[in-house]
Image (cartoon, grey):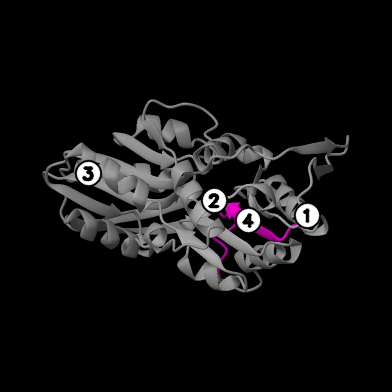
Amino acid sequence: MSKGNLNPKIFVCDNSRVLGKNIAKAFGEELGSVITSKYSDGEFQPSYEESIRGKRIFIICSTNPGPENLMELLLMLDAAKRASARHITAVIPYFGWARQDRKDKPRVPIAAKLIAKMIETAGATRIITMDLHADQIQGFFEKPVDHLYASTIFLPYLQSLNLKNLTIASPDMGGSKRAYAYSRALESDVVICYKQRKKANVISHMELIGDVQGKNVVLVDDMVDTASTLTKAADLMIERGALSVRAICTHPILSGEAYKKIEDSKLERLIVTDSIPLSKKNIKIKVLSCAELFADVMHNVHQNKSISSNFIM
């Protein structure tokens, strides 16, 4: 890699510090210096403690709620723009607020579109993210978006398990495309769960489309929030004769009583990435790092090389 002024700089927001350090290590660079001043009312101000004029910089920050994470990314982007950075790439392992990608009822916002515009306005010239809740969110940006898939991490792990009678499952109709992509790669069957909700995060009814009798099932989803869907699906599949149920979910939001639900369920193992740091350890949860994936893509972006092998499912 070239040295001097052409060398990129990598910076990280507080909520993604552990992942950011691992990405920087895999990339072969030290993290850049940022100091955040905090006021007693909660206001904060990030400050770059080194020159970034004319440089390519990467800012690593997952934007999972609360709003402080998104706000920190926006402030760091704005500061970089005003410090005359040449290229400013927002590396967003988890793009938060993405479930609001359309108007599903009157008088509601399309938050994913709003946040895309905020990130661009703040100064991002490129976005690198992973497993968006909906692929069409890429179209909310006017800047280039590199949409990576965690399947490049999960598939080798699943293959290493050597599971017999493997069946891939989608926990809802919306995830069927993702499930079929995994099934093609693993040459397995597919089943789909059909669920009805009373309201957000509350499932009133769930049915299973397909046969899981005598199968080792792997549920595939982009995120796990309250874990209600995954645990309910796992329990239903065991009732229908499945030998075992595992789940792979890229983004471990794990809010509310998610950890307890996972512990009490028939789910044998939940495999996630470190796009969001876990708030606590759980014997059923295995974390696979996405640091190498992001470091490789960032290196190729910096060198103007193709990254197509990293974002094709």
Q: Which one is in front in this view, the residue at disc 2 or the one at disc 1? A: 1
Q: Quadrant of residue 282?
A: top left
Q: Secondary structure at mark 4?
A: strand
Q: Is residue 13 left or right of residue 197?
A: right
Q: Marks 4 and 2, Cα distance to the nearest angstrom?
A: 11 Å
Residue identified by numbered label 2: 94
Q: Residues within 10 Å of mark 1 (few under 14, many from 20)?
A: some
Q: Residues within 10 Å of mark 4 (few under 14, many from 20)?
A: many
Q: Are marks 3 and 1 in contact (CB under 8 Å)?
A: no
Q: Secondary structure at mark 3?
A: helix
Residue 272 position within the rendered picture, expressed as x and y whole percent measured from the top left: 41, 41
Q: Are marks 4 and 1 in contact (CB under 8 Å)?
A: no
Residue identified by numbered label 3: 159
The residue under the point 72% across, 45% down is 68
Q: Are marks 4 and 2 in contact (CB under 8 Å)?
A: no
Residue identified by numbered label 4: 90
- The amino acid on which the numbered mark 3 sits, given as a three-letter code, is Gln
- The amino acid on which the numbered mark 1 sits, given as a three-letter code, is Arg
- The amino acid on which the numbered mark 2 sits, given as a three-letter code, is Tyr
Q: Residues within 10 Å of mark 2 (few under 14, many from 20)?
A: many
Q: Are marks 2 and 3 in contact (CB under 8 Å)?
A: no
Residue 276 position within the rendered picture, expressed as x and y whole percent measured from the top left: 54, 41
Secondary structure mostly seen in the magenta stretch: loop
Q: Marks 2 and 1, Cα distance to the nearest angstrom?
A: 28 Å
Could you say which is closer to the camera, residue 181 or residue 243?
Answer: 181
The residue under the point 45% across, 56% down is 131
Total label count? 4
Q: Marks 3 and 1, Cα distance to the nearest angstrom?
A: 45 Å
Residue identified by numbered label 1: 53
